[in-house]
Image (cartoon, grey):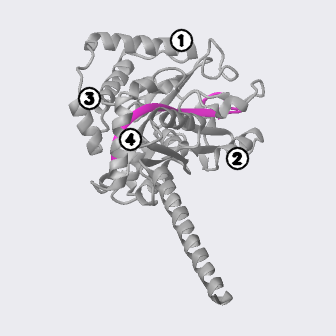
Amino acid sequence: MSPFLSTGRTACVLTATALLLCGSLAARAESLVEHTNRGLVEMVINGDGASVEMAEDLANVLDDGATRRLLPVVGHGALQNLIDLRALRGVDVAIVQTDVLDHAKKTKTPPGIEYAVTYIAKLHNAELHLLAGTAINRIEDLQGKKVEFAGGATITGPAVFNLLNIKVEPVFDDQTMALQKLRAGQVAALGYVAAKPTPFFDTLPGGDGLHFVAIPLKPELASAYVPARLTADDYPRLVKNDAPVDTVAVGVAMIAANLTPNTERYRNVANFVDALFTQFPRLQEPPRHPKWTEVNLAAELPGWKRFGPADTWLKRNVVAAAPQLDEKELHEIFARFLDERTRLTGGKAMSAQEKDKLFDQFRQWQTSQSR
């Protein structure tokens, strides 16, 4: 036999073997890609510690390793997260503050947002933290001064100051740079929205003059925000046991992109929603973030449409509402809360007319937020 013929046959065999091997590797690679992306839902969140921890809770509870996977992605702020959900390829779900949704609708940024997204659930409230140095004792002391608004506060912070008619010079840096500027005295205060307790303030040693400034719940704020309080349990280095700090909070919602029904991404989000609603009690158990205990999945978000599979699940699994206090009892509890807050903060006592006005606004808000 010719040696050239033998060599040619060997080369053919080797080539065929190589092709089979390449085909096998390609099939394995394709199988790996399919397996890794099966049931994938990409969620954009704020970069504060509480949001990251709650996203990890979702992934740890809901991922099953076979048909469902949640991939949290840290975004670039409240409004940008909403824009990314609308325009960025691959983002399926976003965690967004409710006042940011209202701002986007009002300013048309991005245009037609109310028709382009739906909400899965209204979640917890996130508190506005206003941190300042020793020269600032009241929020009114910030009149005419530079105030940093970082993270979720880029929309909420200026809105609160505008409602209180306190004119400040807003500055918008990332949270790390904002805190550095505050400690260097380059700005008078830092506004930051996050679910309490947020690890962002854990690095502050206390005793260096930085402290939380109270934001009083005046009638101007009551129609848009809810009363909240920062306590020593939340921030033992920054808040004294006998001196909690009043503030306001804003709602947070889980929003879905405008996905085409019967597509893979739509089915993935629908599967995620079913798991979220079905296994939600597990999220409310320790050691998960305490904010999960505030969430009522049935709460509605006025002016926005709910994601179809979420709406279907709730209608199929609706439960009777718990008994409510009558109007008189609720009014008395609200008045006692106002009196106690005034006593603790040393503020001016409110008249009965002022209490009634705040209570009416509280009831209007409660009606709009609850089913």
Left or right: 314 as drawn, with respect to 87: left
Per the picture, the main secondary structure of the magenta-coloured stretch is strand
Residue denoted by label 1: 343
Where's residue 30, x and y in %? 49, 60
Mark on residue 79? none
Residue denoted by label 4: 272
How far is the residue under mark 1 from the one under mark 2? 36 Å
What amino acid is at disc 3?
Answer: Arg
What amino acid is at disc 2?
Answer: Met
Q: Earlier in the sequence, mark 3 or mark 4?
A: 4
Q: Residue at x 48, y 56 (%)?
A: 31
User: Which of the two marks, 3 or 4, is nearer to us in this view?
Assistant: 4
How far is the residue under mark 3 from the one under mark 1? 33 Å
Left or right: 254 as drawn, with respect to 146: left
What amino acid is at disc 4?
Answer: Phe
Left or right: 178 as drawn, with respect to 166: right
Is residue 137 located in the magenta-colored stretch of the structure? yes
User: Which of the two marks, 1 or 2, is nearer to us in this view?
Assistant: 2
Residue denoted by label 2: 177
Residue denoted by label 3: 371
How far is the residue under mark 1 from the one under mark 4? 47 Å
Where's residue 97, x and y in %? 45, 41
Q: Residue at x 34, y 24 (%)?
A: 357
**Pointer 2: residues within 10 angstroms few (<14), some, or many (20+)?**
few
Number of numbered markers: 4
How far is the residue under mark 3 from the one under mark 4? 23 Å
